[in-house]
Amino acid sequence: MDTTDDIMRETAACRTCGLEFAAAVCMSPFSPGSVLARQLHCDRCVAAERERQAQGRAAAAREKAERDLEEAWARICPTAYRSRLEGGQTDVARIEALPWWP
């Protein structure tokens, strides 16, 4: 079996969407009548699952980058010096109300 044309196929129903498709079948080289593996999902469902997993990995990477940024900001600017909106003790409105503040 050098190419995908040589792969044995049989009609099967996709476990995800239920549509019939030509499923790839891998036969045992030691016992020609027994099946070692069979494709369970159609190509469209496999591609959709790969895309869903890629989106999940991208979302996890964004969340990690956001956490890393927050941790870096915490090291640079201690909580006491952050604005009250950020959970700190600095009242920005009070500072802006000072007569000498630009």
Image (spheres, rainbow, N blue to C red):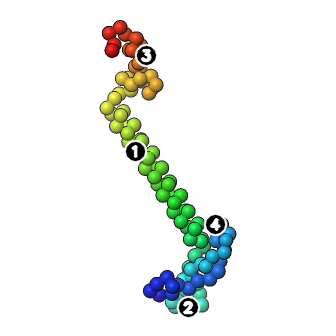
Helix, strand or loop under label 1:
helix
Location of residue 41 (image quadrant): bottom right
Q: Position of residue 91 (x, y in %)?
A: 42, 17
Determine whether label 1 and label 3 are within 8 Å by CB.
no
Q: Position of residue 20 (x, y in %)?
A: 66, 75
Helix, strand or loop under label 3:
helix
Residue type at mark 2 is: Ser
Q: Earlier in the sequence, mark 4 or mark 3?
A: 4
Residue type at mark 4 is: Thr
Instruction: Specify the label residue 65 is tagged with.
Output: 1
Say which residue label 2 marks. Answer: 31
Determine whether label 4 and label 3 are within 8 Å by CB.
no
Around disc 3, counting alpha carbons within 10 Å, would you say few (fewer than 14), some (14 to 19), or many (20 or more)?
A: few
Around disc 2, counting alpha carbons within 10 Å, would you say few (fewer than 14), some (14 to 19), or many (20 or more)?
A: few
Q: Earlier in the sequence, mark 3 or mark 2?
A: 2
Residue that sits furthest to the top in the current view: 99
Helix, strand or loop under label 4:
loop
Distance in Å between CA atoms under marks 1 and 3: 30 Å
Q: Position of residue 24 (x, y in %)?
A: 56, 80
Location of residue 25 (image quadrant): bottom right
56 vs 45, left or right, is left
In the displayed structure, would residue 46 be above or below residue 55? below
Determine whether label 3 and label 2 are within 8 Å by CB.
no
Determine whether label 2 and label 4 are within 8 Å by CB.
no
Q: Earlier in the sequence, mark 2 or mark 1?
A: 2
Say which residue label 4 marks. Answer: 16
Q: Position of residue 55 (x, y in %)?
A: 50, 54
Kindly identify the residue that appears in the image at 41 percent across and 41 percent down: 67
In the image, which is nearer the foreground, mark 2 or mark 1?
1
Kindly identify the residue that appears in the image at 38 percent across and 42 percent down: 68
Distance in Å between CA atoms under marks 2 and 1: 52 Å
